[in-house]
């Protein structure tokens, strides 16, 4: 019975694609889509559509107990989200251009206030799109 239950949970997990782009619907240096709501156990495949991008979790902007990730430049990475909460991430070489995104895992983003506070603090490091990250968080 336990094996059947585990098999059914894995079958129900969904995979999403997030493209890393030089230009997209929301402007320059974007993840598309930049805002996702997913379930615990789902996987996000970050696709290096354009060269010289990566996906990296932002320190202090993921749930307690969640695993961090950092992909190599111009390489795809798949991340499975096993801890509920809010995750913020960036493209490391384009962080100053606010190439960021957010993922809400589950229905209860317990770390929302912490991530929102950190996002406010990050505004000063962005040379453009200063409100992008806070705008994304407000969509959740």
Image (cartoon, grey):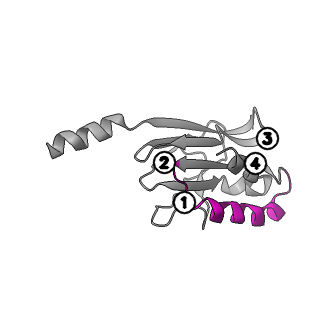
* Secondary element type, mark 3: strand
Is 25 one of the magenta-colored residues? no
- The N terminus, quarter of image: top left
User: What number is the disc on residue 64?
Assistant: none
Sequence-wise first label, 3 or 2: 3
Sequence-wise first label, 3 or 4: 3
**Marks 4/1: CA–CA distance:** 18 Å
Q: Which residue is mark 1?
A: 110
The region drawn magenta spans 105-128
**Residue 35, percent from left and from top:** 64, 42
Sequence-wise first label, 4 or 1: 1
Q: Which residue is mark 2?
A: 106
- Between residue 49 and residue 33, name the one nearer to us: 33
User: What number is the disc on residue 135?
Assistant: 4
**Marks 2/4: CA–CA distance:** 20 Å
**Residue 72, percent from left and from top:** 56, 53
**21 relative to 92, above or below:** above
Number of marks in picture: 4
* Secondary element type, mark 1: loop
Discs 2, 1 touching: Cβ within 8 Å? no
């Amino acid at each position: 019975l336990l094996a059947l239950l585990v098999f059914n949970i894995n079958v129900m997990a969904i995979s999403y694609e997030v493209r890393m782009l030089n230009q997209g619907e929301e402007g320059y240096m974007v993840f598309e889509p930049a805002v996702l709501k997913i379930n615990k156990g789902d996987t996000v495949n970050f696709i290096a559509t354009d060269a010289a991008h990566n996906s990296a979790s932002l320190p202090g902007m993921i749930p307690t107990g969640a695993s961090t990730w950092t992909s190599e430049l111009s390489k795809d990475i798949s991340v499975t989200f096993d801890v509920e909460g809010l995750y913020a991430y960036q493209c490391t070489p384009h962080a100053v251009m606010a190439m960021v995104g957010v993922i809400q895992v589950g229905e209860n983003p317990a770390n929302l206030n912490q991530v929102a506070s950190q996002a406010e603090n990050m505004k000063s490091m962005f040379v453009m799109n200063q409100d992008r990250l806070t705008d994304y968080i407000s969509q959740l």
